[in-house]
């Protein structure tokens, strides 16, 4: 089972530029990491059960995000991400 996500920006071809991306997490708490593309600043956000993370504006242009692997957390986690797709 995949327990990590490599660093990326959400950049699906049909993604509406600047539209908010909403991410809801259930189950085990995991640490979500942001890294600024230029300054390399890192920000860690704990995504607890029932948490809602909103990424909006120029977040995808300036920041990468990832879910680092962990051996400490073995409980399952489900993440639902909602995006606006342009036709
Ligand atoms: O699992 C998460 O919290 C993030 C998922 C994510 O970054 C994505 O689906 O693009
Ligand atoms: Fe993502």
Image: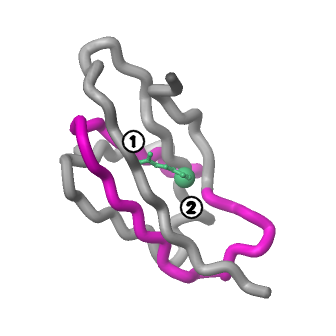
Toward which corner of the image does residue 27 lie, by quadrant? top left
Q: Return the x and y of residue 28 as percentages of the image width and height.
A: 23, 36
Magenta span includes 45: no
| Mark number displayed over residue 33 | 1
Q: Secondary structure at mark 2?
A: helix
Q: Above or below — where is 24 with respect to 85?
A: above
Frontmost of labels 2 and 1 is: 1
Q: Above or below — where is 3 with respect to 7?
A: above
Q: Return the x and y of residue 57 as percentages of the image width and height.
A: 50, 79
Query: Which residue is depicted at the point 73% across and 85% down?
Result: 86
Query: Which residue is depicted at the point 40% across and 50% down?
Result: 79
- Position of the C terminus, as image quadrant, is bottom right
Residue topped by disc 2: 62
Query: Which residue is depicted at the point 34% across and 60% down?
Result: 24
Query: Which residue is depicted at the point 33% across and 46% down?
Result: 43
Bounds of the magenta segment: 10-38
Disc 2 to disc 1, how far (Cα)? Answer: 14 Å
- Front residue (pair 43, 84): 84
| Mark number displayed over residue 13 | none
Could you tell me how many numbered marks the image carries?
2
Can the viewer see residue 42 in this picture?
no
**Chain-order first, disc 2 or disc 1:** 1
Q: Residue furthest bottom?
A: 87
- Front residue (pair 37, 87): 87
Given contact means CB atoms under 8 Å apart, are the residues at marks 2 and 1 in contact? no
Q: Secondary structure at mark 1?
A: strand
Q: Return the x and y of residue 73 as percentages of the image width and height.
A: 26, 21
């Amino acid at each position: 089972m995949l327990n990590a996500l490599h660093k990326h920006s959400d950049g699906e071809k049909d993604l509406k530029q600047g539209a908010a991306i909403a991410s809801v997490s259930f189950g085990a708490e995991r640490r979500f990491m942001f890294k600024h593309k230029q300054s390399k600043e890192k920000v860690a956000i704990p995504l607890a059960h029932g948490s809602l993370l909103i990424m909006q504006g120029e977040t995808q242009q300036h920041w990468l995000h990832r879910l680092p692997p962990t051996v400490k957390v073995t409980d399952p986690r489900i993440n639902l991400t909602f995006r606006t797709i342009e036709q």
